[in-house]
Image: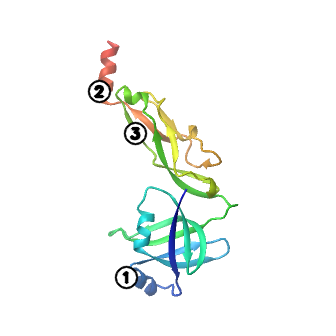
Amino acid sequence: MKTFELNGTVRTDLGKKATKADRVAENVPCVLYGVTDNVHFTATNSDLRKLIYSPEVFVVELNIDGKKSKAIIKALQFHPVTDKVLHIDFLQLTTDKPVVIELPVKLEGLAEGVKAGGKLSLEVRKLKVKGLYTQFPENIVINVSEMGLGKSIQVGKVSVKNLEILNNKNAVVAQVKLTRAARGAAATAGK
């Protein structure tokens, strides 16, 4: 997985007024939920932009007033109207405790059904997996070259080494849908 370095400053005041003042100053209040204790800190909005608005998943190397730790984003909170980031929860990582994270799905290959006139559709963009953070890939790659018209790949058929997929086993990850042109070609071929 890719890493992202983020600097933070410990928050001493935790009330509404202090939080509002932090947001006015273009800082985002954050919490690092750790193994022993929780750390309240702020990070600048500009530093967080590349971390949040990316389809990739990062291991965040936090530097909070000189104390370093590795974490992942557990939860994000946005303003309902302006979409500004209001709050971020980070989860501290350890090498021996498994964590749950969503990894992006990447399709690979040209499906047989697409060659026959169908349309490939990615139904689930991210899959929820559980495992040690050191074994997470950047994305889950699924080969679709064997998929014919009307066929699909379900979560139960996807496997990732050393990770457990937590999504419903019957959920469809990708499928080749029949288009009108493919239906018309199949109808004329059947006559």
Which image quadrant: the N terminus? bottom right
Determine which of the numbered discs, if any, sits on residue 34 in the image.
none
- Judge left or right: residue 15 versus residue 131: left
Determine which of the numbered discs, if any, sits on residue 181 in the image.
2
- Camera-side residue: 39 or 139? 139
Find disc 1 in the rendering and name its residue.
24
Q: Kindly identify the amino acid type of the residue bearing the numbered disc 3.
A: Ser
Label 1: few (<14), some (14–19) or many (≥20) C-alpha neighbours in 10 Å: few
Picture residue at 41% right of the left edge, 67% below the top: 49
* Image position, residue 86 (x, y; %): 42, 73
* Image position, residue 84 (x, y; %): 37, 70
Determine which of the numbered discs, if any, sits on residue 121 in the image.
3
Image mark count? 3
Q: Disc 1 to disc 2, how far (Cα)?
A: 55 Å
* Image position, residue 186 (x, y; %): 34, 20
Residue 113 in sight: yes
Task: Establish if 185 lies above or below 13.
Answer: above
Task: Establish if 50 lies above or below 149.
Answer: below
- Camera-side residue: 97 or 134? 134
Outermost residue on the top side: it is: 191
